[in-house]
Image (spheres, grey):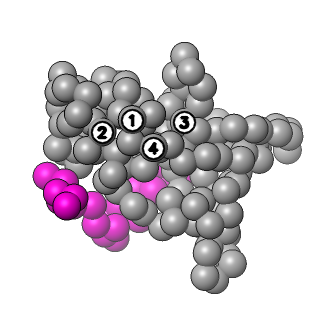
Amino acid sequence: MVNEPTKRFEMTKLRRTANAFVSGFVKYGACPPELHLLTTRGRKSGFLRTIPLSVLDSESGRYLVSPYGEADWVRNLRKDGFATLRQGGWIELVSVRELGSAEAAPLLREYLNHPRAAVVGPYFDAPPEAPDEAFEAEADRHPVFQIMRSTTIRL
């Protein structure tokens, strides 16, 4: 049985407005280096869907972490296995692989040890100092995708 996270994410009008505002900065490259625009194809509609998302650059590779649980972009990625990441004038076509709980646990801990934890931390049950088992449980609620291949183009 999966426990509900401490705080549940809701896409409010304020969040949509904030995403649009942040997306403008990311589109022109005026943002932190880990922030990108993730574009996936809608699994039902086929329309392109874009959201701002932090990419986790780890010693073991690059990862997409869902801090708010099984969001639409997660379900879209599971269906297609590829997406684009944009920052400034660069677009990357990426293919991904979803990680299992044991593989994802140390990456979720690393994700929460970043300053972004102030925003996403309340959506996790485990604090950064929690044991590995707690992060394995978190992996069921916070999917992690490894970026396997990427091709970058300049606009």
**Disc 1 target residue:** 102
4 and 1 marks in contact (CB < 8 Å) = yes
Q: Of the two numbered discs 3 and 1 on the same chain, state the one appearing first in sequence.
A: 3
Crowding around mark 4 (Cα neighbors within 10 Å: few <14, some 14 to 19, many 20+) is: some
Q: Is residue 86 above or below residue 107?
A: below
Give the amino acid type for the residue marked by disc 1 in the picture.
Ala
Q: Determine whether 98 is above or below 44 in the image.
A: above
Q: Which residue is mark 2?
A: 136
Tell whether 51 sits left or right of 41.
left
Q: Nearer the viewer, residue 108 or 104?
A: 104
Which amino acid does the dot numbered 2 rest on? Answer: Glu
Residue 2 percent coordinates (x, y): 22, 58
Dot 1 falls on a residue whose secondary structure is helix
Q: What residue is shown with label 4?
A: 100
Extent of the magenta region: 1-24
Q: How many marks?
A: 4
Relative depth, front residue between 8 and 142: 142
**Magenta residue check for 3:** yes
Residue assigned mark 3:
63
Q: Disc 2 vs disc 1: Cβ atoms closer than 8 Å?
A: yes
**Image quadrant where one finds the N terminus:** bottom left
Rounded to the nearest angstrom, the CA distance separating label 4 from label 2 is 9 Å
Q: Which amino acid lies under the numbered mark 3 shown in the image of this protein? A: Tyr
Badge 4 amino acid: Gly
Q: Residue, x 54% and y 48% (percent of image)?
A: 98
